[in-house]
Image: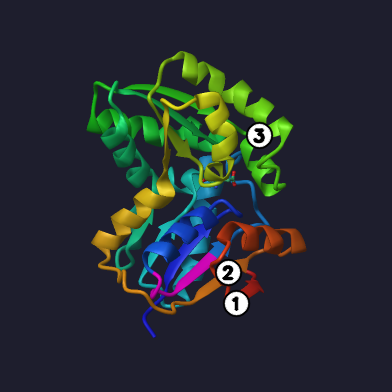
C-alpha cells in the first residue's frame, strides 16, 4: 500500500480540499484530520494557530505520510514549510494566489477569509510580491465558518450575511475573488447571488490538487485508494456533514483521536 497523504483543517472546511484531491488522485490513500475540538482557528492568535499546526502535522506523521497538506488558510498563513525538513508540506495560500493571478483581467482582486487569515496578510503579501500592479481588497468574514459548520449553506440568513460582507467588494469592481478559507466553497451558490456573473471565485481546493499533483508526482490513475477521517472531537453532526460534503466519496474509517 502506498504511503498516505495527510490533510488537515480545523473542521469541515478542509473536506472541500480532500474531495478535490480524492477526485484527482483516486488511487492514493488519504488521512484527514479535523481538529474539531479546537475549532475555530480563525479567531485565534498567530502563536496559538502555529502551535496547532505543528501538533497536527506531528500527529499525522505517525502514519508515515508522504506529505502533508494544510487545508486551512488560517494555519497556512503561519506555515513555514522549510521547518519540516524531510516532509513535504504545502499550504493553500500559494495555490490560491497563483490561480487568482492567472484569472484576473483587470488586476483588481478581492480576498475573503477568517479574521486571522486577513489580519496576518499572507495573501496580500504574496499577491503584491508576485505582481505589484495588483489592487487588493480584503475582507474578513467571521460569520461564514459558523454558518457552514451549522449546515446553513442555503438559508435566507446566509444570503443576508453574504450581502453584508461582499457588497463592498463588488462596488470596488473586482473581477476575481479568492475564497481564502476552505469552508467558503460551500457557500458558493449564496455568494454568487451577490457577486453576479462577472466575478470569478477562486477555490484553493482545485488549485492545490494541481500543485501537489505535479510537485509530488501523484498518480491520477483510477483505483481504490482509502479515505480515513479523524477528528479531535466527534459529534453525530460532524459525521453527517462530512458525509454530505464528501458526497459519493466513501469514508473507509472514521475515528475520534487525541493528539
Ligand atoms: N477552514 C479554515 C480556513 O481555511 C478556518 C476555519 C476556522 O476558523 O477554524 O481558514
Residue 117 sits above or below residue 246 on the image: above
For disc 1, the neighbor class at 10 Å (few under 14, some 14 to 19, many from 20) is few
**Label 1 or label 2, whichever comes before in sequence order:** 2
Tell me the residue that label 1 is attached to: 253
**Is residue 188 in view from this perspective?**
yes
Residue 154 sits above or below residue 3 on the image: above
Q: Is residue 25 magenta?
A: no
Helix, strand or loop status at disc 2: strand
At 54% from the left and 57% from the top, the residue drawn is: 15
**Label 3 or label 2, whichever comes before in sequence order:** 3
At 41% from the left and 16% from the top, the residue drawn is: 173
Q: Dividing the picture into quarters, in which one does residue 109 lie?
A: top left
**Percent of width and height locating residue 176:** 38, 29
At 55% from the left and 73% from the top, the residue drawn is: 228
Distance from label 1 to label 3 (Cα)? 31 Å
Q: Dividing the picture into quarters, in which one does residue 22 lie?
A: bottom left
Amino acid at each position: 500500500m502506498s504511503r498516505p497523504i495527510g490533510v488537515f483543517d480545523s473542521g469541515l472546511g478542509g473536506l472541500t480540499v480532500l474531495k478535490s484531491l480524492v477526485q484527482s488522485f483516486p488511487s492514493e490513500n488519504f488521512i484527514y484530520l479535523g481538529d474539531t475540538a479546537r475549532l475555530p482557528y480563525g479567531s485565534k492568535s498567530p502563536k496559538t494557530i502555529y502551535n496547532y499546526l505543528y501538533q497536527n502535522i506531528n500527529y499525522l506523521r505517525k502514519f508515515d505520510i508522504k506529505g502533508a497538506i494544510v487545508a486551512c488558510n488560517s494555519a497556512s498563513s503561519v506555515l513555514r514549510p522549510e521547518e519540516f525538513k524531510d516532509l513535504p508540506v504545502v499550504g493553500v495560500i500559494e495555490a490560491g494566489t497563483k490561480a487568482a493571478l492567472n484569472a484576473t483581467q483587470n488586476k483588481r482582486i478581492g480576498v475573503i477569509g477568517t479574521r486571522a487569515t486577513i489580519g496576518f496578510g499572507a495573501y496580500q503579501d504574496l499577491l503584491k510580491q508576485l505582481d505589484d500592479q495588483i489592487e487588493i481588497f480584503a475582507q474578513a468574514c467571521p460569520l461564514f465558518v459558523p454558518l457552514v459548520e451549522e449546515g446553513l449553506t442555503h438559508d435566507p440568513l446566509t444570503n443576508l450575511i453574504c450581502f453584508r460582507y461582499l457588497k463592498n467588494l463588488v462596488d470596488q469592481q473586482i473581477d476575481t475573488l479568492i475564497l481564502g478559507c476552505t469552508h467558503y466553497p460551500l457557500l458558493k451558490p449564496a455568494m454568487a447571488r451577490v457577486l453576479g456573473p462577472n466575478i470569478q471565485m477562486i477555490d484553493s481546493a482545485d488549485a492545490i490538487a494541481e500543485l501537489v499533483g505535479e510537485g509530488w508526482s501523484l498518480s491520477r490513475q483510477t483505483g481504490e485508494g482509502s479515505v480515513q477521517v479523524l477528528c479531535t472531537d466527534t459529534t453525530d453532526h460532524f459525521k453527517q456533514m462530512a458525509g454530505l460534503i464528501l458526497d459519493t466519496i466513501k469514508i473507509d474509517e472514521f475515528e475520534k483521536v487525541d493528539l
